[in-house]
Image (cartoon, grey):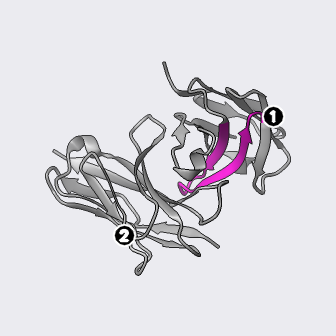
Amino acid sequence: GDSVTQMEGPVTLSEEAFLTINCTYTATGYPSLFWYVQYPGEGLQLLLKATKADDKGSNKGFEATYRKETTSFHLEKGSVQVSDSAVYFCALRPSGRDDKIIFGKGTRLHILP
Amino acid sequence: DTAVSQTPKYLVTQMGNDKSIKCEQNLGHDTMYWYKQDSKKFLKIMFSYNNKELIINETVPNRFSPKSPDKAHLNLHINSLELGDSAVYFCASSQAGGWNTGELFFGEGSRLTVL
């Protein structure tokens, strides 16, 4: 079945470091792909999305490119800040399905000042 | 002015009890959901309602019963609580057709601990 696999956390980086959180998926057809973020004490919120191959989603300095050939949607940011400390979830909506979004396990990110 | 609010935020109870979690959204959305996040952080959809009608019911024990009195509210009632029900339960909402954009708006979660 459809699934999302993302790197285990926690990930700990120093401020201004480069960030990559890996995400790969298994799905038939062309799913839509998403990154959600959960800041401490808050609910999940959409960070960025891409709905077709080679699309690049971006928001708040974060980027992710939909790579059909490698079934990946890795999250990147060039220079992280302490305020980026949160849990990041990769997710997909299966092709042709309007009734569910499947989430990865989440990756906790700690940024040290 | 919270968009999606859940109560209570924390709930500690004994096995066998019955408890409810309430959810309200003030976004005017048509669709509401319950997700369960287990100790391994997996998020799994349990139920979704569109305009008070059930549209998704994943494989969830029938001890879990959602109720939607109107499209702004989706409550979750759990009977005969078991240890395995301990988790964080998230309520979410979206616009009609929101699934097509993935724009889910989540509440802060309700952490249920069954002793």
- Frontmost residue, A37 versus B85: A37
- What residue range appears in magenta? B31-52
Chain identifier of the residue bearing label 2 in the image:
A
Name the residue at the top extreme.
Answer: B1
- Picture coordinates of residue A53 (x, y %)? 42, 70
Q: Name the residue under label 1.
A: B17
Q: Is residue A7 toward the left or the right of residue B32 in the image?
A: left
Disc 1: CA contacts within 10 A as few (<14), some (14-19) or many (>=20): few
Please say if A13 is above or below A24: above
**Secondary structure of residue under mark 2:** loop
Residue A49, horizontal then vertical, whole percent: 42, 55
- Verify CB contact (< 8 Å) between mark 1 and mark 2: no
Crowding around mark 2 (Cα neighbors within 10 Å: few <14, some 14 to 19, many 20+) is: some
Residue depicted at x 45% and y 56%: A34
Q: Residue B17, image x and y in percent?
A: 81, 34
Q: Which residue is drawn at 71% across and 44% down?
A: B48
Predominant secondary structure, magenta span: strand
Q: Quadrant of residue A102?
A: bottom right
In the rendered view, tell whether residue A106 sits above or below residue A47.
below
Queried whether the magenta region covers residue B37, the answer comes back as yes
Q: Mark 2 points at which residue?
A: A54
Give above or below for B5 relative to A33.
above
Q: Which of A20 and A27 is in front in this view?
A: A27
Single out the mark in the foreground, 1 or 2: 2
Q: What chain does badge 1 belong to?
A: B
The disc labelled 2 sits on which kind of residue? Asp
